[in-house]
Image (cartoon, grey):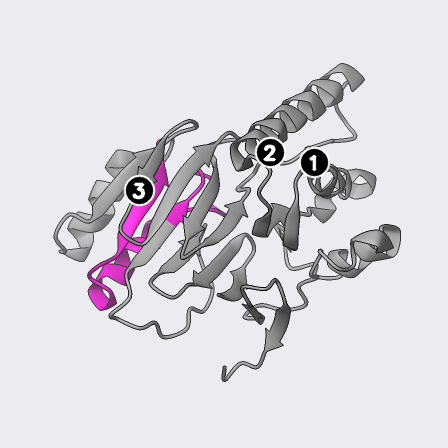
Amino acid sequence: MKIQFIFHSSYLIETERCYLLFDYYQGELPELDTLKPLYVLASHNHYDHFSPVVFQLIRKYPATVYVLSDDISVQQCEEAVRELGIAPPKIRWIHPGIEYTFPECRVEAFGSTDHGVSFLVEADGMRLFHAGDLNDWCWTNVPKSQSQAMQQDYLAELAKLSAALEGATLDAAFIPVDPVLGDGQFQGPREFLESISVRHTFPMHMWERYSVGEKFLAGYPKYRSVFQPIRKTGERFLLERDGELMPQSEEA
């Protein structure tokens, strides 16, 4: 399985039979194999997780399927499609507790501690989790009771994910590590890794401050084998079925 960091919270995954593009709103995409279906997943309606620009992909990849959180505006999507002058795309609207089974993958939605959903995806024998804005958003300027409620909600959602996995290990997870949270930026990632069995975890929602990955490992070196810092846009990795993760050159 190939993994490429696109921008902010957007990752592109290539499996044997399909592509999965998460939370794309800007950034350079590589050329894709037109014979493979492309699944575009958007976790919620915030501008940094969804843009109608994703519908432009249909012109080059007509087999594109969209799995969109149902808090995204239907009207906005319809207007974008009309402006592009394309046929109505295949859209599957999703909210927590809903799952779709496609020929190449299965997508199940979990909750968020902000807007929309998080995604558990199974494709070609690999299990992936994209958190969207599911995080322990421990803001310093809110009452302690609110922070405690946020933490409880986050841990409850992780417990649901853990139960759904039924003892299985995620092959890859993509989770927010947001420097805007200051001293609390690592609380959510730490709680995720304490709660969920995962082979490799990738940060996102970093606002281009890519040093946060190495800072996390400096504070929690025990996670060095499972946490992969991101240093730039376009960074690529190859994840083998045996769990080995290898960096890839831009030409790979």
Q: Amino acid at mark 1?
A: Ser
Q: Tell me the residue at 81%/56% (across/down).
A: 217
Report x, y in % for residue 166.
55, 34
Q: Which residue is mark 3?
A: 101
Query: What is the secondary structure assignment of the residue under circle 1?
Result: helix
Q: Is residue 81 above or below residue 238?
A: above
Q: Which residue is mark 1?
A: 195
* Category of crowding for the residue at label 3, using alpha-carbon neighbours closer than 10 angstroms: few (below 14), some (14–19), many (at least 20): few
Q: Is residue 154 above or below residue 124?
A: above
User: First in sequence: mark 2 or mark 3?
Assistant: 3
Report the span colored magenta: 41-70
Q: Amino acid at mark 3?
A: Thr
Q: Tell me the residue at 69%/39% (across/down).
A: 192
Q: Amino acid at mark 2?
A: Ser
Residue 161 placement, left or right of 146: left
Query: What is the secondary structure assignment of the residue under circle 2?
Result: helix
Q: Which residue is mark 2?
A: 162
Q: Tell me the residue at 21%/44% (across/down).
A: 79
For residue 209, say whether it is visible.
yes
| Mark 1–mark 2 distance (CA, rounded to whole Å) | 7 Å
Report x, y in % for residue 122.
43, 48
- Label 1–label 3 contact, CB within 8 A: no
Q: Is residue 28 above or below residue 139?
A: below
